Image (spheres, rainbow, N blue to C red):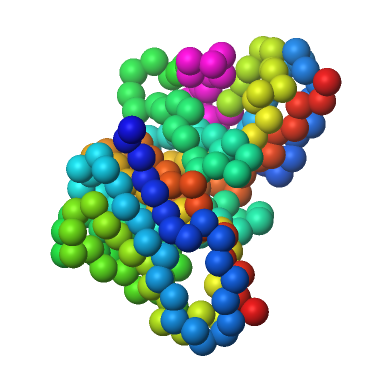
């Protein structure tokens, strides 16, 4: 089954404790992206990657890091999480960057930072 | 830069009633337009898209949206809703040149009452 998977689905952590949210897709997609969803704000792009070893900032990159060492994986790293990073996070992928309007989304990771 | 405004944060309707979810966009260049749907506890799924051609586009489950360039709108409609349509709906825009970036609206929560 074609899908985007994220782990963990739920995470409660404390301020300053480094964490990684994994994202993997099995569709051989070139383009991958991370979003955060907050009430009243819709989805905002954090980082995106047009292909392996090619990443770029989205609209809200502060406090986040990403890497794209393999085509299928695009982990999101929070080096020192803060309470304002409490949010619902989605990973997404599309066949190419030019087709990024048709993105396949993962199920989401709900992160709480206390 | 592009922006998207969804005029209603919540829309309650009765089952089998018609519904319209409003979306306006702002862009200085030509755009692609999309509606995504998020069912409870799931990621987003592409519902329908306007890329070019006919300004009226339809989904497989009875929704339709009409691109109105003069009013910069892309409202979503369904003549008769079902309980299973309960979800959050996001309007999104992408410029034709910068296809790697989707800008989402704030979302409209559609609640269907029996």
Which picture quadrant has residue B53?
Answer: top left
Q: Position of residue A46 (x, y in %)?
A: 41, 63
Query: Is A57 on the left-hand or right-hand side of B36?
Result: left
Query: Which residue occupies 32% across, 52% down?
Result: A24
Residue B68 higher or lower than A13, as above or below: above
Q: Position of residue A49 (x, y in %)?
A: 26, 58
The quadrant of the picture occupied by the C terminus of chain B is top right
Q: Is residue B65 magenta?
A: yes
**Foreground pick, B95 / A81:** A81
Q: Residue furthest bottom?
A: A16
Total marks in image: 0
Q: Position of residue B8 (x, y in %)?
A: 71, 40
**Foreground pick, A112 / B73:** A112
Residue B8 higher or lower than A38, as above or below: above
Q: Position of residue B4 (x, y in %)?
A: 53, 46
**Foreground pick, A100 / B50:** A100
Query: Which residue occupies 38% across, 67% down?
Result: A76
Q: Which residues are magenta?
A: B59-75
Query: Which residue occupies 33% across, 64% down?
Result: A75
Q: Is residue B34 magenta?
A: no
Visible residue check, residue A97:
no
Residue A41 higher or lower than B109, as above or below: below
């Amino acid at each position: 089954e074609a899908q985007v998977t994220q782990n963990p689905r739920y995470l409660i952590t404390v301020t300053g404790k480094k964490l990684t949210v994994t994202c993997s897709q099995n569709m051989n997609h070139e383009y991958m992206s991370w979003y955060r969803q907050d009430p009243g704000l819709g989805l905002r792009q954090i980082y995106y990657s047009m292909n392996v070893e090619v990443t770029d900032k989205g609209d809200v990159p502060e406090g986040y890091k990403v890497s794209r060492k393999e085509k299928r994986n695009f982990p999101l790293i929070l080096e020192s999480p803060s309470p304002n990073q409490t949010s619902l996070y989605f990973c997404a992928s599309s066949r190419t960057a030019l087709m990024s309007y048709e993105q396949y989304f993962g199920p989401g990771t709900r992160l709480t930072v206390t | 830069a592009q922006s998207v405004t969804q005029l209603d944060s919540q829309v309650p309707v009765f089952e089998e009633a018609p519904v319209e979810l409003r979306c306006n966009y702002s862009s200085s260049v030509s755009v692609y337009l999309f509606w995504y749907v998020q069912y409870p506890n799931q990621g987003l799924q592409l519902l329908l898209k306007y890329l070019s051609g006919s300004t009226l586009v339809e989904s497989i489950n009875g929704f339709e949206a009409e691109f109105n360039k003069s009013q910069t709108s892309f409202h979503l409609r369904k003549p008769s809703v079902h309980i299973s349509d309960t979800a959050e709906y996001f309007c999104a825009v992408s410029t034709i040149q910068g296809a790697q970036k989707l800008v989402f609206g704030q979302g409209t929560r559609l609640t269907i009452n029996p």
